[in-house]
Amino acid sequence: MQHSGEAMELQSNSSLTKRWIIYIIGIYILTLGISLAIRAGIGISPQSSLTRTMTVIYPELTQGTYSFLLELIMLFLAYLVLPKDFKWKYFAGLIPALVLSVFLDLNLLLTSFIKLELYYTKVMLLVVADAALAYGLFLMIRANLVLIPVDLFVNTVFKRTKRKWGNIKTVFDCSLLVIAACIGLIFLSEIMFIREGTIINAILVGQYIKLYSYLYKKAQTRKIGGDPTIINR
């Protein structure tokens, strides 16, 4: 989840119950997007490429399980980066991380029937997948709740280094790609799930979120303009 002024503008001030509903829906749509991107078969996001590669090496564990294990590692690394500032409440991020893992396995099961042969259909599916993934992220930002450990780690490094958040996120994603590639080469003698779709994902997701943010702000402006008594959420 993006650490920026623009993201802060999108965050909701609704009741806690409503925000949790939005957050869980966002997680489900996010995992649906990840699943569709995997079914497209032309490359997936850095985090997904790492966990997906692990399912090939040791298929006894599901991708959702590997995803949750990665979240545990990120939580531990966040503690190592800033141990004095680490708070017990950060463990709450494991709750949505667990939900994400369950939804991911569910959506991978529900989309298992998708088997595409033509390249252009794979590209089209990836475009749809990235749209869903980005919308899920957008809803999670809107909910303004606890950070899952992966996002917490990036934000913790941001606080420690004072570097630009976007640069830190880029380095983090690239690191995951390198790790996924190295693991693939060591255990499988090939790099898996890192292809042109990985680059497409990196470009489209950010642009989709910008589009959703623009449409949301435009809708809010029209809503307030139509009734001066209406305030933001």
Image (cartoon, rainbow, N blue to C red):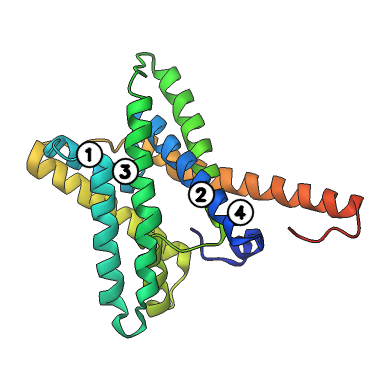
x and y percentages locating residue 90 in the rendered image = 38, 70
Question: Which badge, 3 or 2, is on the more N-terminal residue?
Answer: 3
Does residue 202 appear in this view?
Answer: yes
- Residue at mark 4 to residue at mark 1: CA–CA distance: 31 Å
- Identify the residue shown where x is 51% and y is 41%: 204
Q: Amino acid at mark 4?
A: Lys
Question: Which element type, helix, strand or loop, lies under badge 3?
Answer: helix
**Which amino acid, mark 2?**
Leu
Q: What residue is drawn where x is 40% and y is 38%? A: 34
Kindly identify which numbered label has been placed on residue 18.
Answer: 4
* Label 3 environment density (alpha carbons within 10 Å; few <14, some 14–19, many ≥20): many
Number of residues whose C-alpha sits closer than 10 Å to that of mark 2, classed few (under 14), some (14–19) or many (20 or more): many
Q: Is residue 200 above or below residue 95?
A: above
Sequence-first disc among 2 and 1:
1
What type is the residue that disc 3 sits on? Ser
Q: Mark 2 or 1, which is nearer the eye?
A: 1
| Crowd class of label 4 (few under 14; some 14 to 19; many from 20; radius 10 Å) | few
Q: Is residue 64 above or below residue 120?
A: below
| Mark positioned earlier in the residue sequence (3 or 4) | 4
Measure the C-alpha gap from mark 4 to mark 2: 16 Å
Give the residue at mark 2.
137
Give the labeled residue for mark 1. 62
Of all residues, the one furthest to the top in this rendering is 117
Residue count near mark 1 (Cα–Cα under 10 Å), binned few <14, some 14–19, many ≥20: some
Q: Of the two numbered discs 3 and 1 on the same chain, state the one appearing first in sequence.
A: 3
Q: What element does badge 4 sit on? A: helix
Q: CA distance from mark 3 to mark 4?
A: 29 Å
Mark 3 and mark 4 in contact? Answer it, CB < 8 Å: no
**Badge 3 is on which residue?**
48
Callout 2: SS: helix
Q: Earlier in the sequence, mark 4 or mark 2?
A: 4
Tell me how far mark 3 sits from mark 1, CA to CA: 12 Å
